[in-house]
Structures are given as C-alpha cells and as structure tokens.
C-alpha cells in the first residue's frame, strides 16, 4: 500500500492517478478528506501531519509514503511509520536546501529539518528537490482577470519553473523503480525564465495584456502581508534579489521519466482558464 500525503495538492492529485492507473494499492491522506475526489477504489483518509492521532489509521498496512515536508511533528510521523512497517519514504522537499545558507532561510530550513529527520531514521528515504513551481504564477490570476498590473519587486529575477505534472511523474518514477530508492534528485523546468518573461508568455497564451508594476520590495511586502508572513516574505525577496542571472538547470526529469520537462508556456496553456473568465 502506498500512502500519498497532502491529498489536495496538485502533485499529490496527479501522483495518485498515476499510481492508480498502474493498478497499485493507493491511499490518499488529507486534513480534509471529504473535499477530495480520488479515483474509484482509492481510499481517502484523514491525515493531519501536525496531529499524531491521525497517523495510525492512515499508515495501517502502508509500505511506501509520498510525504510533503512538514517539520512540526515529523519525528512522530517517522516513529509511527516505522511501527507500521513503512520501508520507503519519498519526500517532496525543495532545491532551496542547496542554497549557501539554508539555515537562515525559513523556507529552506523547514525542508532541511524534515530531510535531516528522515535521513537519521532507518527508513530508506528518496528526496525530490524541485525548484520553483510554475504554479506559483497562479497567484497572479486574480490580477490578470481583473485587468490590474502585477506588482513585482524583481521582474528580472530568474526562476526555473517546473510543471506540477513533471514533479508527479518524477515521484511516480522513484516510487515504482527500485533503482531510484534512496536517491537525491534536483528537479527543474527546461528554462530559466525571468518573471517578466513568464508574464509575457502568460499574456501570449491568454490573449490579454498583463502589465507589470515594478514596485519596491517594501511595497510588495506590505501588499502581501495578509497571506505571506514577514519572515517568509523577507526570504523570498532575498532569493529573488540574488537571482539576477539564469539559473542552472538539470536533466533529472527527463532521466527519471524518459521525457523532457514541460515548458512554462505549456503550464500556462494547461491553466489558461484560471486567468480568464471562461
């Protein structure tokens, strides 16, 4: 039995479908399982990674776990997983842990803490470290639909946007192929793109202008204060400010899945409806 955590996430949803397609026994966990619509025959269970009382039922009979990084009760989760007979955990981490000083970045440190806890356990751990998700651009949807400019403090900052389906397919590969068990895999999209270039591709796909308002970091931090804690906002600003050149890319998605990663334009085409009225 394979347990997929974070069941409402785009990666988990796609991974669950891929595993089910293969005829594998899959269970999907979520803090709100009633909101899920898994494939027929896939059990949805309550699993809150901050609530250990939900761990035993979710882990019963499970041998493999696809785990979202959540440092709060990871040691408890590992203990329950060992007791349940889990032999392999695939962790969705972040390439931020590879930065020069991940300890000073709360985003990177949260992933690093989970990695360290798993690597200190006897359970075989495979780590996926994607860079920037293309789906981060989804945060622009409301402004694009409203015809408002996007507030960007560093429009020329580079990212390596990766399609969530490529992450799911990479996860499927490392779960189902024992040759990859215990590996560390850094995942990127096929291009290093600035935010301005992503906006241009999004405008071309949607057929509507997407203006950019080049704001100061302080102004962006004020605008985003309601949904991004100050410490995380500061970490993002520091990261964007440092990425003024193209980022190094990997061929890991292709090596794992046999196909090159999808472009940002493909992601925009797949999600065009999120940016339009229909």
Image: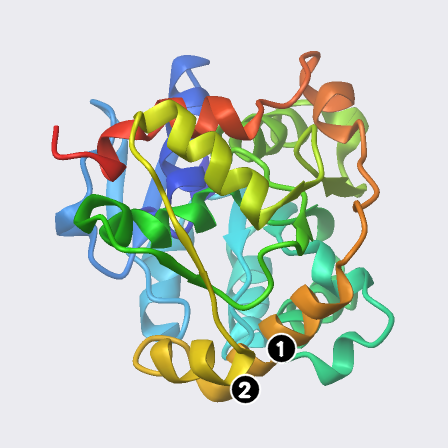
Of residues 210 and 5, the one nearer the viewer is 210
- Mark 2 residue crowding within 10 angstroms, few (<14) / some (14–19) / many (20+): few
- Where does residue 73 sit, x and y in percent of width and height? 50, 77
Of residues 162 and 57, the one nearer the viewer is 162
Name the image quarter holding the C terminus: top left
- Where does residue 230 sit, x and y in percent of width and height? 48, 87
Element marked by disc 1: helix
216 in relation to 246, above or below:
below
Provide the residue designation for mark 2.
Answer: 231
36 in relation to 267, above or below:
below
Left or right: 28 in relation to 163:
left
Please tell me in which quadrant of the rendered image residue 171 appears: top right
Residue at the spot 80% in from the left edge and 27% down from the top edge: 251
Of residues 233 and 54, the one nearer the viewer is 233
Residue at the spot 68% in from the left edge and 79% down from the top edge: 105
Provide the residue designation for mark 1.
Answer: 235
Give how far apart the Cα atoms at labels 1 and 2 are: 6 Å
Residue 63 in sight here: no
Residue 136 in sight here: yes
Left or right: 207 in relation to 117:
left
Element marked by disc 2: helix
- Mark 1 residue crowding within 10 angstroms, few (<14) / some (14–19) / many (20+): some
Q: Which mark is residue 9?
A: none
Please tell me in which quadrant of the rendered image residue 184 appears: top right
Marks 1,2: beta carbons within 8 A = yes
Residue at the spot 50% in from the left edge and 85% down from the top edge: 218
Residue at the spot 71% in from the left edge and 64% down from the top edge: 115
| Name of the residue lying farthest toward the right | 100
- Where does residue 209 sit, x and y in percent of width and height? 33, 37
- Where does residue 3 sit, x and y in percent of width and height? 44, 43
């Amino acid at each position: 039995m394979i347990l997929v955590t974070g069941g409402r996430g785009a990666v988990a949803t796609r991974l669950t479908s891929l595993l089910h397609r293969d005829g594998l026994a899959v269970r999907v966990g979520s803090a709100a399982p009633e909101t899920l619509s898994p494939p027929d025959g896939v059990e949805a269970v309550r699993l809150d990674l901050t609530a250990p009382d939900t761990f035993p039922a979710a882990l019963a009979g499970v041998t493999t776990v696809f785990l979202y990084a959540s440092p709060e009760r990871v040691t408890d989760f590992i203990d329950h997983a060992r007791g349940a007979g889990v032999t392999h955990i695939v962790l969705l981490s972040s390439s931020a842990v590879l930065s020069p000083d991940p300890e000073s970045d709360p985003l990177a440190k949260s992933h690093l803490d989970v990695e360290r806890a798993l690597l200190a356990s006897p359970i075989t751990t495979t780590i996926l470290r994607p860079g920037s998700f293309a789906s981060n651009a989804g945060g622009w949807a409301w402004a694009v639909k409203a015809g408002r400019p996007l507030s960007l403090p560093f429009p020329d900052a580079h990212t390596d946007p990766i399609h969530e389906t490529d992450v799911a397919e990479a996860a499927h590969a490392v779960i189902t192929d024992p040759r990859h068990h215990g590996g560390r895999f850094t995942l990127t999209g096929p291009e290093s793109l600035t935010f301005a270039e992503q906006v241009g591709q999004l405008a071309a796909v949607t057929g509507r202008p997407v203006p950019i308002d080049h704001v100061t970091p302080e102004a962006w931090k004020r605008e985003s204060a309601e949904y991004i804690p100050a410490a995380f906002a500061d970490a993002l600003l520091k990261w964007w400010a440092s990425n003024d050149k193209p980022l190094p890319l990997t061929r890991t998605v292709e090596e794992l899945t046999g196909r090159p990663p999808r472009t940002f334009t493909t992601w925009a085409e797949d999600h065009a409806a999120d940016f339009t009225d229909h």
